[in-house]
Image (cartoon, rainbow, N blue to C red):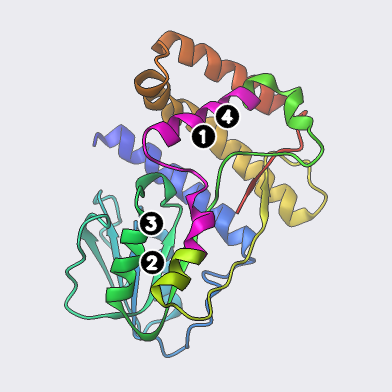
């Protein structure tokens, strides 16, 4: 991965971490973990922002973060360790964890049942797993998404191309049932909406919308190029033109669109 790519991903994930912070009112997790939690695994940790903050709040907890890319900072709290690892392969940790956390890993997971199996094997009895995920596509309760034809087309194309590539962007909706079938108890869901743009009424919702808009504007081309060219057969020139049109629709703010979380 090039330095430019690392810098772009780092900035993007810092922005996304900020969105999560605001959305969860400063909380890092919703699972009722004990203050005496001693071990935590953050899978697909990215830049390590969540893992580092969790370690700061729980200084007696040993936090392990894993990701395919070693893009985490060198200077971290003493109770944090980062490992390059593929969470879709067998996990080989020497001990089980009190708490396993993940955030926004949907695009990297094709087999959620296999992932849940690994969680089950690596979680202590009485431990907690928390998946913090979005699920596509964007939607609007008042059908205003139809006022943005380029955005609406991109929204539908992204979902269909991802499905053809073996990734269902709404797969998280099936995970509660998978957890229950595996034997997990106290399975719960907390749903919210992230607005696209500052159209929502609440102060928090407006801020989330502003940041999500900025995030999406910076991510659309990179997210779309491979799927559109490899799966849908578009030319790179056509994708770039389409992305410009999607940008125009987003900036116009005609749609009361949101992504379910």
**Residue at image mark 4:** 156
Q: Nearer the viewer, residue 85 or 213?
A: 85
**Residue at image mark 1:** 159
Q: Secondary structure at mark 4?
A: helix
For residue 14, above or below residue 58: above
**Residue at image mark 2:** 51
Inter-mark Cα distance, 3 to 4? 23 Å
Question: For residue 112, what is the image quadrant?
Answer: bottom left
Measuring from the top left, give residue 252's x and y in whole percent: 73, 24
Which residue is depicted at the point 51% across and 49% down? 16
Q: Which residue appears farthest toward the bottom when viewing the image?
A: 36
Q: Earlier in the sequence, mark 3 or mark 4?
A: 3
Crowd rating for badge 4 (residues with CA inside 10 Å; few <14, some 14–19, many 20+) = few
Inter-mark Cα distance, 1 to 3? 17 Å
Q: Nearer the viewer, residue 196 or 81?
A: 196
- Quarter of the image that includes the N terminus: top left
Which residue is depicted at the point 82% across and 38% down? 142
Crowd rating for badge 1 (residues with CA inside 10 Å; few <14, some 14–19, many 20+) = many
- Quarter of the image that includes the C terminus: bottom right
The part of the chain drawn in magenta is: 152-176
Q: Earlier in the sequence, mark 1 or mark 3?
A: 3
Q: Earlier in the sequence, mark 4 or mark 2?
A: 2
The reply to whether callout 4 and callout 1 are in contact (CB within 8 Å) is yes
**Residue at image mark 3:** 112
How many numbered circles does the render carry? Answer: 4
Question: Comparing marks 2 and 1, which lies closer to the viewer?
Answer: 1
Q: Secondary structure at mark 3?
A: helix
Q: Earlier in the sequence, mark 2 or mark 1?
A: 2
For residue 106, above or below residue 161: below
């Amino acid at each position: 991965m090039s330095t430019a790519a690392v810098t772009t991903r780092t900035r993007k994930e810092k922005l996304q971490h900020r969105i999560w912070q605001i959305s969860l009112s400063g909380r890092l997790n919703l699972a009722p973990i004990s203050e005496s939690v001693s071990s935590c695994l953050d899978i697909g940790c990215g830049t390590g922002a969540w893992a580092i903050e969790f370690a700061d709040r729980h200084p007696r907890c040993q936090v392990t973060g894993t990701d395919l890319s070693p893009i985490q900072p060198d200077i971290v709290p003493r109770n944090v360790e980062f490992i390059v690892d593929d969470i879709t392969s067998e996990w080989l940790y020497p001990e089980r964890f009190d708490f396993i956390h993940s955030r926004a890993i949907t695009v990297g997971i094709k087999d959620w049942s296999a992932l849940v199996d690994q969680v089950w094997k690596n979680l202590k009895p009485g431990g907690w797993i928390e998946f913090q995920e979005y699920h596509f596509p964007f939607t609007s309760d008042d059908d205003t998404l139809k006022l943005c034809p380029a955005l609406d087309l991109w929204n539908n194309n992204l979902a269909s191309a991802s499905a053809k590539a073996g990734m269902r962007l709404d797969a998280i909706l099936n995970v509660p049932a998978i957890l229950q079938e595996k034997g997990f108890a106290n399975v719960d869901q907390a749903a919210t909406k992230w607005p696209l743009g500052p159209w929502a009424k609440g102060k928090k919702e407006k801020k989330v919308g502003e940041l999500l808009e900025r995030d999406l504007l910076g991510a659309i081309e990179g997210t779309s190029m491979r799927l559109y060219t490899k799966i849908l057969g578009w030319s790179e020139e056509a994708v770039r033109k389409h992305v410009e049109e999607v940008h125009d629709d987003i900036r116009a703010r005609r749609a009361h669109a949101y992504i379910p979380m």
